[in-house]
Amino acid sequence: TLLRAVAGLTPVASGRVYIGGNDVTYLPPDRRKISMLFQDLALFPHLNVFENVAFGLRLRHLPEEEVRKRVVWALELVRLDPAQFMSRRVHQLSGGQQQRVALARALVVEPEVLLLDEPFSHIDLDIKSRLLEELKILHNKLGFTLIYVTHDRFEAVEIGDKVALMKAGEIVQVGKPVELYKRPKNRFVAEFFGEANIIPASLLGAGRGGYAVVRPEDVVIGNNPTYKFRGQVIDVTFLWHYLKVEIQSNGHIFKAYVDLETPISVGDVVDFGFDAKDVYFVEE
Protein backbone atom coordinates (compact mmCIF):
# COMPACT_ATOMS: atom_id res chain seq x y z
CA THR A 1 0.00 0.00 0.00
CA LEU A 2 2.83 2.41 0.85
CA LEU A 3 4.55 1.85 -2.50
CA ARG A 4 1.27 2.21 -4.38
CA ALA A 5 0.57 5.49 -2.57
CA VAL A 6 4.02 6.83 -3.49
CA ALA A 7 3.47 5.75 -7.09
CA GLY A 8 0.04 7.38 -7.25
CA LEU A 9 -1.81 4.09 -7.74
CA THR A 10 -3.62 4.30 -4.38
CA PRO A 11 -5.25 7.54 -3.11
CA VAL A 12 -3.66 9.02 0.00
CA ALA A 13 -6.11 9.24 2.93
CA SER A 14 -3.94 11.69 4.88
CA GLY A 15 -0.50 13.23 4.66
CA ARG A 16 1.45 14.32 1.58
CA VAL A 17 3.82 12.72 -0.92
CA TYR A 18 6.90 14.71 -1.94
CA ILE A 19 9.42 13.80 -4.63
CA GLY A 20 12.47 15.99 -5.03
CA GLY A 21 10.86 18.59 -2.78
CA ASN A 22 7.75 18.80 -4.97
CA ASP A 23 4.27 17.90 -3.72
CA VAL A 24 3.02 15.10 -6.01
CA THR A 25 0.16 13.89 -3.79
CA TYR A 26 -2.46 14.43 -6.50
CA LEU A 27 -0.20 14.09 -9.53
CA PRO A 28 -1.13 11.16 -11.84
CA PRO A 29 1.30 8.18 -11.87
CA ASP A 30 2.61 8.85 -15.39
CA ARG A 31 3.86 12.30 -14.33
CA ARG A 32 5.75 11.25 -11.19
CA LYS A 33 8.99 10.00 -12.80
CA ILE A 34 8.71 6.72 -10.91
CA SER A 35 9.51 3.14 -11.91
CA MET A 36 8.29 0.06 -10.06
CA LEU A 37 9.70 -3.45 -9.93
CA PHE A 38 7.34 -6.05 -8.51
CA GLN A 39 7.84 -9.52 -7.11
CA ASP A 40 6.35 -11.14 -10.23
CA LEU A 41 8.47 -8.95 -12.61
CA ALA A 42 5.58 -8.64 -15.12
CA LEU A 43 7.77 -9.21 -18.19
CA PHE A 44 5.81 -9.66 -21.42
CA PRO A 45 6.34 -13.26 -22.65
CA HIS A 46 5.30 -12.42 -26.23
CA LEU A 47 8.00 -9.74 -26.55
CA ASN A 48 11.75 -10.17 -26.80
CA VAL A 49 14.19 -8.56 -24.36
CA PHE A 50 14.61 -5.44 -26.50
CA GLU A 51 10.88 -4.76 -26.69
CA ASN A 52 10.39 -5.49 -22.98
CA VAL A 53 13.03 -2.95 -22.01
CA ALA A 54 11.82 -0.46 -24.64
CA PHE A 55 8.18 -0.62 -23.52
CA GLY A 56 8.23 2.51 -21.34
CA LEU A 57 10.18 4.47 -23.95
CA ARG A 58 7.65 3.65 -26.66
CA LEU A 59 4.86 4.98 -24.44
CA ARG A 60 6.80 8.25 -24.43
CA HIS A 61 6.94 8.22 -28.26
CA LEU A 62 10.71 8.64 -28.44
CA PRO A 63 12.49 8.38 -31.82
CA GLU A 64 13.58 4.84 -32.72
CA GLU A 65 17.26 5.74 -32.66
CA GLU A 66 16.92 7.12 -29.13
CA VAL A 67 14.98 4.03 -28.02
CA ARG A 68 17.70 1.69 -29.27
CA LYS A 69 20.46 3.79 -27.72
CA ARG A 70 18.81 3.81 -24.29
CA VAL A 71 17.91 0.10 -24.35
CA VAL A 72 21.56 -0.74 -25.07
CA TRP A 73 22.61 1.60 -22.24
CA ALA A 74 20.17 -0.01 -19.77
CA LEU A 75 21.17 -3.58 -20.65
CA GLU A 76 24.83 -2.73 -20.24
CA LEU A 77 24.02 -1.16 -16.86
CA VAL A 78 22.64 -4.48 -15.59
CA ARG A 79 25.50 -6.45 -17.17
CA LEU A 80 23.62 -8.10 -20.01
CA ASP A 81 25.37 -8.05 -23.39
CA PRO A 82 22.90 -6.29 -25.76
CA ALA A 83 24.14 -8.20 -28.81
CA GLN A 84 23.58 -11.50 -27.04
CA PHE A 85 20.30 -10.83 -25.22
CA MET A 86 18.19 -8.26 -27.12
CA SER A 87 16.54 -10.81 -29.40
CA ARG A 88 15.90 -13.46 -26.75
CA ARG A 89 12.44 -14.29 -25.46
CA VAL A 90 11.63 -14.28 -21.76
CA HIS A 91 11.40 -18.10 -21.56
CA GLN A 92 14.97 -18.33 -22.84
CA LEU A 93 16.32 -16.46 -19.80
CA SER A 94 17.37 -17.76 -16.40
CA GLY A 95 15.72 -16.38 -13.27
CA GLY A 96 18.63 -14.03 -12.62
CA GLN A 97 18.61 -12.81 -16.23
CA GLN A 98 14.88 -12.10 -16.05
CA GLN A 99 15.50 -10.03 -12.92
CA ARG A 100 18.15 -8.02 -14.78
CA VAL A 101 15.84 -7.42 -17.75
CA ALA A 102 13.07 -6.20 -15.42
CA LEU A 103 15.57 -3.90 -13.70
CA ALA A 104 16.79 -2.57 -17.06
CA ARG A 105 13.18 -1.82 -18.06
CA ALA A 106 12.72 0.11 -14.81
CA LEU A 107 15.95 2.10 -15.23
CA VAL A 108 15.73 2.85 -18.95
CA VAL A 109 13.20 5.67 -18.38
CA GLU A 110 15.66 7.32 -15.93
CA PRO A 111 13.29 7.56 -12.93
CA GLU A 112 13.83 9.89 -10.00
CA VAL A 113 12.44 7.20 -7.70
CA LEU A 114 12.69 3.42 -8.08
CA LEU A 115 10.18 1.36 -6.06
CA LEU A 116 10.93 -2.32 -5.48
CA ASP A 117 8.52 -4.77 -3.85
CA GLU A 118 10.51 -7.87 -2.79
CA PRO A 119 11.92 -8.27 -6.33
CA PHE A 120 14.50 -10.94 -5.47
CA SER A 121 12.45 -13.20 -3.19
CA HIS A 122 12.22 -16.10 -5.68
CA ILE A 123 15.88 -16.47 -6.66
CA ASP A 124 18.70 -18.31 -4.91
CA LEU A 125 20.88 -16.66 -2.30
CA ASP A 126 24.06 -16.27 -4.37
CA ILE A 127 22.29 -14.56 -7.28
CA LYS A 128 20.29 -12.39 -4.86
CA SER A 129 23.48 -11.24 -3.14
CA ARG A 130 25.09 -10.28 -6.47
CA LEU A 131 21.98 -8.42 -7.64
CA LEU A 132 21.72 -6.49 -4.37
CA GLU A 133 25.37 -5.47 -4.66
CA GLU A 134 24.91 -4.35 -8.26
CA LEU A 135 21.68 -2.51 -7.42
CA LYS A 136 23.50 -0.54 -4.74
CA ILE A 137 26.27 0.33 -7.22
CA LEU A 138 23.65 1.51 -9.75
CA HIS A 139 21.94 3.57 -7.07
CA ASN A 140 25.19 5.32 -6.18
CA LYS A 141 26.09 5.80 -9.85
CA LEU A 142 22.76 7.16 -11.11
CA GLY A 143 21.61 8.99 -7.98
CA PHE A 144 17.94 7.97 -7.96
CA THR A 145 15.99 7.45 -4.73
CA LEU A 146 15.45 3.77 -3.99
CA ILE A 147 12.58 2.47 -1.83
CA TYR A 148 12.94 -1.26 -1.28
CA VAL A 149 10.27 -3.31 0.52
CA THR A 150 11.41 -6.59 2.06
CA HIS A 151 10.66 -8.94 4.95
CA ASP A 152 14.33 -9.97 5.02
CA ARG A 153 16.40 -7.99 7.53
CA PHE A 154 19.63 -9.02 5.80
CA GLU A 155 18.44 -7.44 2.54
CA ALA A 156 17.38 -4.30 4.40
CA VAL A 157 20.77 -3.92 6.08
CA GLU A 158 22.72 -4.76 2.92
CA ILE A 159 21.02 -2.23 0.66
CA GLY A 160 19.57 0.47 2.93
CA ASP A 161 21.22 3.74 3.94
CA LYS A 162 18.14 4.25 6.09
CA VAL A 163 15.65 1.63 7.28
CA ALA A 164 11.99 2.11 8.25
CA LEU A 165 10.71 -0.89 10.20
CA MET A 166 6.94 -1.36 10.02
CA LYS A 167 4.52 -3.39 12.13
CA ALA A 168 0.78 -3.71 11.48
CA GLY A 169 0.95 -0.91 8.90
CA GLU A 170 2.73 1.59 11.15
CA ILE A 171 6.36 2.70 11.17
CA VAL A 172 7.96 1.62 14.46
CA GLN A 173 11.46 3.06 14.01
CA VAL A 174 13.45 4.86 11.32
CA GLY A 175 17.22 5.19 11.21
CA LYS A 176 20.49 3.85 9.92
CA PRO A 177 20.72 0.03 10.12
CA VAL A 178 23.31 0.21 12.91
CA GLU A 179 20.99 2.47 14.95
CA LEU A 180 18.12 -0.03 14.79
CA TYR A 181 20.53 -2.83 15.65
CA LYS A 182 22.37 -1.17 18.53
CA ARG A 183 19.66 1.24 19.76
CA PRO A 184 16.29 -0.47 19.17
CA LYS A 185 13.19 1.46 20.21
CA ASN A 186 11.42 -1.56 21.68
CA ARG A 187 11.59 -5.34 22.00
CA PHE A 188 10.05 -5.91 18.57
CA VAL A 189 12.84 -3.95 16.86
CA ALA A 190 15.51 -5.63 18.99
CA GLU A 191 14.32 -9.13 18.06
CA PHE A 192 13.63 -8.36 14.40
CA PHE A 193 17.13 -7.02 13.77
CA GLY A 194 19.01 -10.10 14.91
CA GLU A 195 19.68 -12.35 17.85
CA ALA A 196 19.65 -10.63 21.21
CA ASN A 197 19.82 -11.42 24.88
CA ILE A 198 16.64 -9.84 26.24
CA ILE A 199 16.50 -9.72 30.02
CA PRO A 200 13.54 -8.39 32.07
CA ALA A 201 14.75 -5.23 33.83
CA SER A 202 13.70 -1.87 35.23
CA LEU A 203 15.34 1.54 35.41
CA LEU A 204 16.31 2.43 38.97
CA GLY A 205 14.45 5.49 40.20
CA ALA A 206 12.27 5.67 37.10
CA GLY A 207 9.81 2.94 38.04
CA ARG A 208 9.58 1.80 34.43
CA GLY A 209 9.63 -1.86 33.50
CA GLY A 210 11.18 -3.16 30.33
CA TYR A 211 14.12 -5.16 29.06
CA ALA A 212 17.90 -4.95 28.95
CA VAL A 213 19.10 -5.80 25.44
CA VAL A 214 22.60 -7.18 24.86
CA ARG A 215 23.78 -8.47 21.49
CA PRO A 216 25.59 -11.86 21.51
CA GLU A 217 28.82 -10.36 20.14
CA ASP A 218 28.96 -8.12 23.23
CA VAL A 219 28.85 -11.06 25.65
CA VAL A 220 32.37 -12.09 26.69
CA ILE A 221 33.48 -15.33 28.27
CA GLY A 222 36.17 -14.85 30.91
CA ASN A 223 37.94 -11.47 31.06
CA ASN A 224 36.51 -8.89 33.47
CA PRO A 225 33.23 -7.37 32.25
CA THR A 226 31.16 -4.91 34.27
CA TYR A 227 28.33 -7.39 34.87
CA LYS A 228 29.51 -10.92 35.68
CA PHE A 229 27.65 -14.22 35.76
CA ARG A 230 28.46 -17.90 36.00
CA GLY A 231 26.67 -20.56 33.99
CA GLN A 232 26.86 -23.86 32.15
CA VAL A 233 27.36 -24.19 28.41
CA ILE A 234 24.37 -26.06 26.94
CA ASP A 235 25.11 -25.69 23.22
CA VAL A 236 27.95 -24.73 20.86
CA THR A 237 27.17 -24.11 17.17
CA PHE A 238 29.66 -23.50 14.35
CA LEU A 239 28.52 -20.49 12.27
CA TRP A 240 31.34 -20.05 9.74
CA HIS A 241 33.08 -16.98 11.19
CA TYR A 242 32.38 -17.61 14.86
CA LEU A 243 30.95 -20.01 17.43
CA LYS A 244 27.52 -19.39 18.89
CA VAL A 245 27.56 -20.43 22.55
CA GLU A 246 24.43 -20.81 24.69
CA ILE A 247 24.91 -20.55 28.44
CA GLN A 248 22.29 -21.32 31.09
CA SER A 249 22.47 -19.11 34.17
CA ASN A 250 19.94 -18.07 36.83
CA GLY A 251 17.01 -19.38 34.82
CA HIS A 252 18.02 -17.53 31.63
CA ILE A 253 19.76 -18.69 28.47
CA PHE A 254 22.42 -16.26 27.27
CA LYS A 255 23.83 -16.30 23.74
CA ALA A 256 27.44 -15.33 23.00
CA TYR A 257 29.45 -15.17 19.77
CA VAL A 258 33.09 -16.13 20.32
CA ASP A 259 36.17 -16.76 18.17
CA LEU A 260 36.44 -20.13 16.43
CA GLU A 261 39.61 -20.88 18.39
CA THR A 262 37.89 -20.47 21.76
CA PRO A 263 38.34 -23.73 23.75
CA ILE A 264 34.78 -24.38 24.91
CA SER A 265 32.47 -27.40 25.03
CA VAL A 266 28.98 -28.35 26.12
CA GLY A 267 28.96 -28.94 29.87
CA ASP A 268 31.69 -26.42 30.69
CA VAL A 269 31.01 -24.08 33.60
CA VAL A 270 32.14 -20.59 32.58
CA ASP A 271 32.29 -17.04 33.85
CA PHE A 272 30.81 -14.57 31.38
CA GLY A 273 29.23 -11.15 31.20
CA PHE A 274 29.06 -7.82 29.41
CA ASP A 275 30.04 -4.18 29.89
CA ALA A 276 27.61 -1.41 30.82
CA LYS A 277 28.20 0.39 27.51
CA ASP A 278 26.84 -2.62 25.61
CA VAL A 279 23.49 -2.75 27.47
CA TYR A 280 20.49 -0.92 26.03
CA PHE A 281 17.18 -0.55 27.87
CA VAL A 282 13.88 -0.81 25.99
CA GLU A 283 10.38 -0.45 27.37
CA GLU A 284 7.63 -3.07 27.15
Image (tube, rainbow, N blue to C red):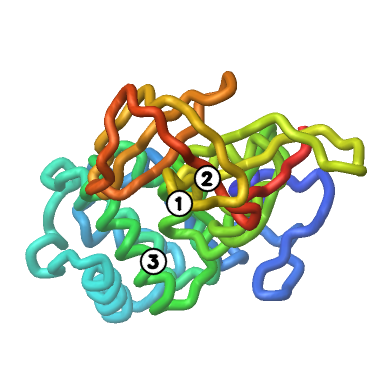
Counting from the top left corner in percent of width and height, residue 81 is at: 13, 68
Between the C-alphas of marks 1 and 2, the distance is 17 Å
Counting from the top left corner in percent of width and height, residue 88 is at: 12, 53
The residue shown at (27%, 72%) is: 77
Between the C-alphas of marks 1 and 3, the distance is 40 Å
> To which residue does mark 2 refer?
215
> To which residue does mark 3 refer?
136
Q: At numbered mark 1, what does the secondary structure look like: helix, strand or loop?
A: loop
| Residue 54 visible | no
Q: Closer to us: mark 1 or mark 3?
A: 1
Of the image marks 1 and 3, the number of the one nearer the N terminus: 3
Neighbours of disc 2 within 10 Å: few (<14), some (14-19), many (20+): many
Rendering quarter of residue 23: bottom right
- Up-down: is 78 above or below 45? below
> To which residue does mark 1 refer?
223
Report the front residue among 122 and 41.
122
Report the front residue among 261 and 112.
261
Q: At numbered mark 3, what does the secondary structure look like: helix, strand or loop?
A: helix
Report the front residue among 78 and 84.
78
Rendering quarter of residue 163: bottom right
Q: At numbered mark 2, what does the secondary structure look like: helix, strand or loop?
A: loop
Mark 3 belongs to which amino acid? Lys
Q: Closer to us: mark 1 or mark 2?
A: 1
